[in-house]
Structures are given as structure tokens and as C-alpha cells.
Image (spheres, helix red, strand yellow):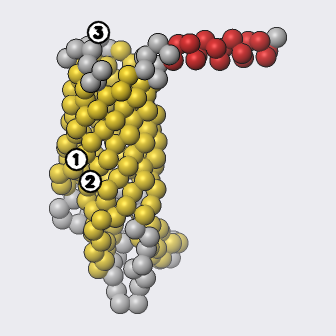
Amino acid sequence: MRKIYLLLSLISFVSYSQQKKDWFFGLEIGNNTITSSNLSNKNSLQGGFMVEYYFTKQWSVLGRLKYYKTGTINNTKTAYFKGAVLSLPVDFKWEYKITNKFKGNLFTGIALNKEVKSSYYYPPNEKIDYSTFFVSFNAGVGLTYFLNNKTGIYINYETYKYGGYKGTSGNILGAKNYYTENNLLNIGLKHNFK
């Protein structure tokens, strides 16, 4: 009986998922805040392109290509890193209806990052040959207003955590690892060309 129920559930999910198969393409721009550093110029402009595939009315896969600055600093301020990355976040997104044209969403996934600019200000005896390719955790929340069935304007807030490892500093209480971490505020436009 359990197998029949599982099979019927799977068939209904697949049938339901075939009801909505839409591709959206768009552009986004916004503010980037480096949260892993208290250096000056923590805020900067960031932007990118997005592709979203809805496989049901409420669920989609969201892929983007983004450019933003990042950095870290140790707790004694004797070593810091400044750089910029090209990031490819891939997220699962759940969208819920607020009104007919206004929808909220939550999303989470991972981001593949490649440093395109790296500047290390470390003491001479410290390692600076850290990997320029790294993965980070990505999560966010947003709102979308659909102008019509094909075009939407959105705003979202997202965080990138546990990015590129840039060293460890120790003290009496133990060691602390340093990773690049950022918060991004995006405003974007997406459109279905079908």
C-alpha cells in the first residue's frame, strides 16, 4: 500500500510540475556589503544576469552570474584581503502568492566563485597562496511584482557565507578562521520571451 501511495504521489507531482514550465531571463543591480571585514569601503555596486526556470507554479531553479567585491580582515588588523569575484549562485526558490501580481519568495543554494582580483596585505611570513576558486552557501528572501504574465520587477536580499578561506589567527581563546562573506541587495527585471 505504501508503494502505491508513493507512486501516486510521484505521478501527481510530475503531472503538476508539467503544468508550469517557464523560463525567465533578466538583469539585476544593487548594493554589496562586505560583512567579513570592517575596512572602509565595505559597500559597493554589484550586478549580474539571471536565468530562472519554473518547474511548478511555486518552485523554480534560479541561476545567476554576478560580479561583486569581497574581503576579510583578521581580529588584530595585521592582515587583510581585498578582491572581487565572479559568482555563479544556483538556488532553489519557493514563491508564494501575496496578491494576484505580488509574490514573495525564499531561496537557498550554493555559489561557485572565482576571484578575478586579489590583493593581500599580510605580514611577510604569512601564507597568501589561497585558492582563487571557492564555494559559498547562499540564501535569501525577496518580493516580485508581475507587470503581466511575462514580466516581473523584483527586489531581494541575500547572503553569501563561508566563502573563500583566507587564513587563521589565534589567541588565548582559540583560533578563528577567516572567510569572505557578503550581503547583497538586488533590484532586477525578469522577462519570459515565450
Q: Which residue is mark 3?
A: 100
Q: Spot the residue most to the bottom.
A: 125
N-terminal of the two: label 2 or label 3?
A: 2
Left or right position of 150 against 94: left
Please report contact status of discs 2 and 1: CB closer than 8 Å, yes or no.
Answer: yes
Marks 2 and 3, how far apart at CA: 33 Å
From what the image shows, is residue 10 above or below residue 41?
Answer: above
Q: Which residue is mark 2?
A: 67
Q: What residue is at 52 percent from the left and 72 percent from the top?
A: 174
Marks 2 and 1, how far apart at CA: 6 Å
Where is residue 30? Give x, y as percent: 19, 43
Three-letter amino acid code at the position of disc 3: Asn
Q: Badge 3: how crowded within 10 Å, few (<14), some, or many (20+)?
A: few
Q: Spot the residue most to the right.
A: 1
Of 146 and 164, nearer the camera is 146
N-terminal of the two: label 1 or label 3?
A: 1
Where is residue 76? Give x, y as percent: 34, 76
Quarter of the rendering occupied by the C terminus: top left
- What label does residue 59 carry, if any? none
Mark 2 falls on what kind of element? strand
Left or right position of 5 against 151: right
From what the image shows, is residue 162 above or below residue 4?
Answer: below
Marks 1 and 3, how far apart at CA: 28 Å
Of 89 and 180, nearer the camera is 89
Q: Badge 2: how crowded within 10 Å, few (<14), some, or many (20+)?
A: many
Can you tell which quarter of the image residue 133 is in?
bottom left
